[in-house]
Image (cartoon, rainbow, N blue to C red):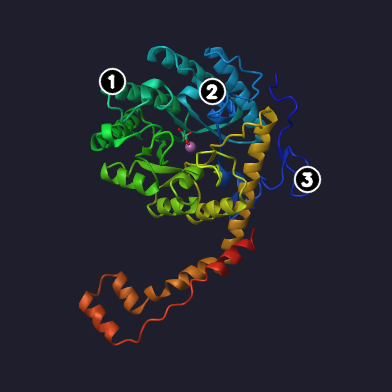
Amino acid sequence: MSYFPEIPKIRFEGPASKNPFAFKHYNPDEVIEGKTMRQHMRFGAAYWHVMRNGLSDPFGGPTALMPWDDMSDSVDNAIKRADVFFEFLDKIDIDYYCFHDRDISPELPTLAQSNAALDKVTDHLKALQSATGKKLLWGTACLFSHPRYSQGAGTSPSADVFAYGAAQVKAAMDATHKLGGEGYTFWGGREGYATLLNTDMKRELDHLARLLHLAVDYAKKIGYTGQFYIEPKPREPSTHQYDSDSAACLNFLRQYGLIDYFKLNLETNHATLAGHTMLHEMTVAIDANALGSVDANQGDELIGWDTDQFPTNIYLTTSIMRKILEMGGLTTGGLNFDAKRRRESHDPADLFHAHIGGMDAFARGLKAAAAIRADGRLAEFVAKRYSSWDSGVGAQIENGELGLDEISAHVLSQAEPTIPSGRQEMLENLINDFI
Ligand code: XUL
Ligand code: CO
């Protein structure tokens, strides 16, 4: 039985193709810098957006047509959705997926019932994975939708709510482990505050760290060796979220002795909300050896919220792929399309157009990034810009060989320093030459 009978399997047809159901640039087997595009990208589809996002917004209800979904909280409905999703993965040729526990399986009146449903659905997902070779990039627990989490989960003022969240994390980790998930993500949905008037920030942060340590300990106990991620986002739904950006997350992880166990899952639209570029967020993470995975989307510069659009900006995908190539590639992580269609794009076919566009945009980004690296002028310019540190007084300062008195004596013997142009516009032109 096919849920997308009109949609063919999406294949690479090349830039001249006019077929909207074909890749123009993503050629999974094409080798770039020694790896196939498929290996570089490790594309993932987000279960919550593909299967569960009805495309409602603050002003109106769902528009997405999901003829396969009876909208019930039954396990049968959840299992049917999984079948639809795996047909989607097959046709779009995406190897990985990501989920929240409550996307794949319903939240029922008691934790015991929810856990039992999750078990049944993950049995089915496991069978689908082994039948198709599709893999779980990461799993996570939804600790932000249910009203009990309205004041946080790990940072809730209620110890009982914290405990419920921790129990949900246990079950979501068991599910991720069972499905061979390569990672497990914490996104601080409501881990922040609406107002400081009622908030003991220090205590909340201590508790959040406790939750992450509990997860690390539990992973050791069950032999789960996947990578933990923390996903920064500054606000929405909270006024301020503790995991606000790469730097704040790294500081938190270091302060609480978690830095060896976590990497960052960076999302483009979250970077924008934090007032940063994705390039900035990636640079901060990579310099700390902590970039794990990417939630690939883009925001709208005219709308101030998390619009989660599909990435189509080739300038953006080029900068992302340049950083990924620079760091030596993704290992456990991938490019997970945490992106949704616009509310107007309600047809199931739009799921395909959206992902094709994102995959092609990343393919073009990868090709441009590799060409920029092969050209070498950008890297050479940066190396030369710092070359005064490679020898002489620069090298001595870098190596800690000089004190302030020696540096002062050196300067007194020299003429006024001169500094070459930063050549920003020339470098912007250079990048555009490859796009
Ligand atoms: C929300 C968001 C989440 C996380 C997983 O903005 O990005 O979907 O990726 O909880
Ligand atoms: Co995300």
Residue 29, image x, y percentages? 66, 46
- Quarter in which the C terminus is drawn: bottom right
Name the N-terminal-most of marks 2 and 1. Answer: 2
Residue 17 disc label: 3
Q: Is residue 295 above or below residue 314?
A: above
Q: Nearer the viewer, mark 3 or mark 1?
A: 1
Q: Report which quarter residue 410 is drawn in.
A: bottom left
- Residue linked to disc 1: 160
Density class for disc 2 (Cα within 10 Å; few <14, some 14-19, many ≥20) is many
- What amino acid type should be assigned to the residue bearing mark 1? Asp
For label 2, being within 8 Å of ligand 1 is answered no
Question: Does residue 78 appear left or right of residue 231 in this picture?
Answer: right
Question: Which element is circle 3 on?
Answer: loop
Distance between mark 2 and mark 3 Cα atoms = 35 Å
From what the image shows, is residue 211 above or below residue 297?
A: above
| Residue 312 in picture, x, y percent from top left | 62, 46
What type is the residue that disc 2 sits on?
Leu
Q: Residue at x 60, y 66 (%)?
A: 429
List the residue tagged with mark 2: 125
Residue 32 in the image: state x and y as whole percent.
61, 54
User: Callout 3, which amino acid?
Assistant: Ser
At a point 55% along the width and 17% down the height, the residue shown is 78
Q: Is residue 146 visible?
A: yes
Circles 2 and 3, Cβ within 8 Å, touching? The answer is no
Q: CA distance from mark 2 to mark 1?
A: 31 Å
Callout 2 secondary element: helix
User: Which of 105 and 28 lies nearest the eye of the viewer?
Assistant: 105
